[in-house]
Image (spheres, rainbow, N blue to C red):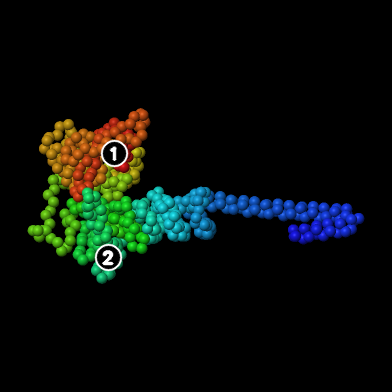
Amino acid sequence: MTWIFIILVIAIIVVSIIYWKIAIPIIVVLALIIAVWLILAKRKEQEEERAMEEESAKEEAERKRLIADLEKFVTLPEQRQKEISKILDERDMYIGGDEWNFLKMWIQSPLNKYQRQIIAPLIQEESMVPEIMQDFINTFDDLPDSETGYENCLFLLQMKWASKYKTADINPICHYVARHLKGTGIEPIDCDDMIVDRPCYLKSEIRSVNQRQKDGKLYYDIKNAQNVKLYVFDDTVELMDNSHWRINIPSILDIKVDDRSYPERNDGLYYILSITCQNRGNIFLLCDAYNAAMIQAVIPQVKRRNIKGEQKKADETETYREHETAANGAVQPEVSVLNPAVLPWIGPDYIEGIAGKKVMIVGDCRCQDVQEWNTGYVADVIGKKYLSGNTDIPAYNGLTNIGKAIAGKVLSDEEKAILWNRLAFVNFFQEPVADLRNVSDGQVESGQNAFMQVLEKYAPDRIIACEPLYGSLPDKGHQGPEVRLSSPWKDGKLYSTETWIYPLPYGRECMVMPIANPGGGFPWDYWHELIIEFLK
């Protein structure tokens, strides 16, 4: 169109020169034509701008609607969920700024079956893996349990992460899987392979590794790892390679995933799973993310299934190789110095612990009537009386204050049960003591011997010792670092308290912190601040 006007103008100029008498009319006509052209061009430009503004407003409205819908995603109709997933799936994966915040909101929305459409392509972009994947994994810590969330956990655990991503923290997913299995329970699966033809709860192909020392430093001998098959049965975990390892499940004290990961086999990440057994050291397994999570989740559920919340004597059978026997052909039983009446309370979720630490309380359930000290007295006081709401027991105030000091708040009956199921409680004295100010040397010595045996058997990470019992604990070990408040307490002062460290078998340690007598006038909010620092 523009070229037509240019040619027309040139033609009019040429005609005007030849026919100068009609130049003025021609110029007028030319001016009118140009004016009309400018008006039409301006109108078209305004229409285009208006269309762009309408499209932009429409996109912004849709964006706001999407962002608003993310807050209530799982309550939306199925069709709307699909629309949101399709829009996000068609977006460019190389995003930043506000676009990243938008995608992050989607990732952190309640878990749903459409999230896999987003995560799958993202996992292929190595530059996006560290930030996006860890953000997504971390959301599992705070999300409510659901079957869909559990399926998403398994999906993520089975994916292969890029080898450059060496700091993947899978613990939030492991905790979610364990929480789901705890709520839904586990059922045995039929197992009919070349080795085993009986039901089991889990079977996996993994590798066993040895921990070695070089130049004063411990390391895992991954190069010489051995392929093994792992089976979890009702009462044992069995590892089969050229020989046969059997671990009695009641003897398992702890299962943890090492913080480090190891790029192995086609860029997949592998983790060291450490299983701590009673009176034995650690067994180290090299697993992919899926098996690390499932083993860590299933074994405690089998153990809980067998214990069913009731106190149970530790089985004397230790981890052993079937082809190996003791020199005299028999396993020597452990000689116990514990009074059966005051066997410790070991919560069914003790292995899960508090803040990732197995926590034990050292206190004293006092009574004056020897007849009350029937077998399992401590377990009865906590499990059958205190947690059932009996306020008449002498230990009620002390146990309640300990719970408030750990949790940092007044607990409901349900919250008390959840907390104490994660704790262990040991009665220091092995016979009735009515007055802690008048105890004999013999009573203290028997308490110390029993305390050391409890440490070896249950391997706590942290012990909270109620005064005045802290001063009666054995003097083995050494002074630990002070626990200090990270910020001033409400009176404006910074407080600290001493700790003591006890050695445990196989190079492990346990730290003890004293607290005031929780029986009365106990400032639980103050001690809560110190306990938080102590558990770090």
Q: Secondary structure at mark 1?
A: helix
Q: Is residue 328 left or right of residue 192?
A: left
Q: Position of residue 346 (x, y in %)?
A: 24, 47
Crowd rating for badge 2 (residues with CA inside 10 Å; few <14, some 14–19, many 20+): some
Q: Given the current orientation, which residue lies at the most extreme bottom position?
A: 194
In the picture, the quarter occupied by the N terminus is bottom right
Q: Position of residue 314 (x, y in %)?
A: 19, 52
Would you name the residue on which mark 1 appears? 402
Q: Is residue 126 left or right of residue 288?
A: right
For residue 57, which numbered disc appears in the image?
A: none
Q: Is residue 210 left or right of residue 16?
A: left
Q: Given the current orientation, which residue lies at the most extreme right position?
A: 21
Q: Could you tell me if the residues under marks 1 and 2 are in contact, i.e. CB atoms within 8 Å?
A: no
Q: Given the current orientation, which residue lies at the most extreme front position?
A: 18
| Disc 1 to disc 2, C-alpha distance | 42 Å
For residue 199, which numbered disc appears in the image?
A: 2
- Residue at image position (77%, 58%) is 6
- Residue at image position (62%, 51%) is 57
Q: Secondary structure at mark 2?
A: loop
- Residue at image position (18%, 43%) is 451
Say whether residue 373 is visible.
Answer: no
In the picture, the quarter occupied by the C terminus is top left
Crowd rating for badge 1 (residues with CA inside 10 Å; few <14, some 14–19, many 20+): many
Amino acid on which disc 2 is placed: Pro
Q: Position of residue 299 (x, y in %)?
A: 28, 56
Amino acid on which disc 1 is placed: Ile
